[in-house]
Image (cartoon, rainbow, N blue to C red):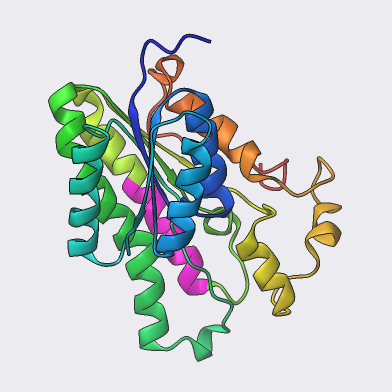
């Protein structure tokens, strides 16, 4: 397959789960891919896997809640791969805590990673997109921000913030040739979901999957397919949208 429009794509949270699925799909699409993750060795291992398939890939240890870490990461991406034109913000953490037990520190950490971290990465990527008059941004939010979720007030609030941020930036950046959309997954079979299952915070992933109208949990590939489309030239007239990839769990 010929890829005349290879671009540089940055995926945060790229070492596992949804982020890794998106990074793999972008590599298949022919893009040069940078995987940013707070687990540096895992990001480097994932990049090596992609590189072994002939793709230009870079794995970097980056904490999205640390502005200087992001700046250093994007500087390396530009130096080694080129200007950034595609960004998917998949880095995120979750927590299951009754509202009365959410500490100030617990609240701040969720907001710092999920909401401020998303903003930090977008702001770091924007100069390249504005210079090119072309850009694609997809944020990964959560259906918990749409439907609500018990014991997840801080998480749902952070992801609701991501949805609002997405809409605001879509309007502000539209004339710059940059689209901004969000995908709010529901149940996706990822290491994070399995960790929650092991901790007793979620019923079994398979058990929950049977409750989904389509009859199964989502996969990182399901999310990645939608990302691929939104970040392609075919997605050029879609911006500010909430693209639910959730098997019918939230309609």
Expressed as whole percent of the image width and height from the top left, the position of residue 125 reads 23, 41
Q: Residue at x 49, y 23 (%)?
A: 29
Residue 228 forms part of the magenta stretch: no
Q: Residue at x 30, y 66 (%)?
A: 65
Expressed as whole percent of the image width and height from the top left, the position of residue 250 reads 66, 47
Q: Chief secondary structure of the magenta span?
A: helix
Residue 134 vertical placement versus 41 (above, below) = above
Q: Residue at x 18, y 39 (%)?
A: 79
Residue 56 vertical placement versus 93 (above, below) = above
Is 119 in front, or is 148? Answer: 119
Expressed as whole percent of the image width and height from the top left, the position of residue 190 reads 65, 56
In the displayed structure, does residue 17 sit left or right of residue 114? right
Q: Which quarter shows the C terminus? A: top right
In the displayed structure, does residue 97 sit left or right of residue 37? right
Is 65 in front, or is 21? Answer: 21
Range covered by the magenta-colored residues: 153-165
Q: Residue at x 63, y 62 (%)?
A: 191
């Amino acid at each position: 397959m010929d890829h005349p429009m290879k671009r540089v794509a940055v995926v945060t949270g790229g070492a596992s789960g949804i982020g890794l699925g998106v990074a793999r799909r972008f590599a298949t699409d022919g893009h040069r891919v940078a995987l940013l993750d707070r687990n540096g060795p895992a990001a480097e291992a994932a990049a090596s896997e992609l590189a072994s398939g002939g793709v230009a890939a870079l794995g970097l240890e980056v904490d999205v809640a640390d502005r200087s870490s992001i700046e250093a990461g994007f500087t390396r991406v530009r130096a080694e791969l080129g200007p950034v034109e595609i960004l998917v913000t998949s880095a995120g953490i979750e927590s299951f805590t009754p509202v009365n037990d959410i500490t100030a520190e617990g609240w701040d950490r969720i907001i710092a990673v999920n909401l401020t971290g998303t903003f930090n990465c977008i702001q770091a990527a924007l100069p390249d997109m504005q210079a090119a008059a072309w850009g694609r941004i997809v944020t990964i939010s959560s259906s918990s921000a749409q439907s609500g979720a018990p014991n997840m007030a801080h998480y749902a609030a952070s992801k609701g913030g991501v949805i609002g941020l997405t809409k605001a930036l879509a309007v502000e950046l539209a004339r710059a040739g940059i689209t901004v959309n969000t995908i709010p997954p529901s149940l996706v079979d990822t290491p994070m979901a399995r960790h929650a299952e092991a901790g007793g915070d979620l019923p079994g992933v398979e058990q929950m999957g049977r409750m989904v109208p389509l009859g199964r949990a989502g996969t990182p590939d399901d999310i990645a397919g939608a990302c691929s489309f939104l970040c392609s030239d075919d997605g050029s007239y879609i911006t500010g949208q909430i693209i639910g990839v959730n098997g019918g769990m939230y309609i």
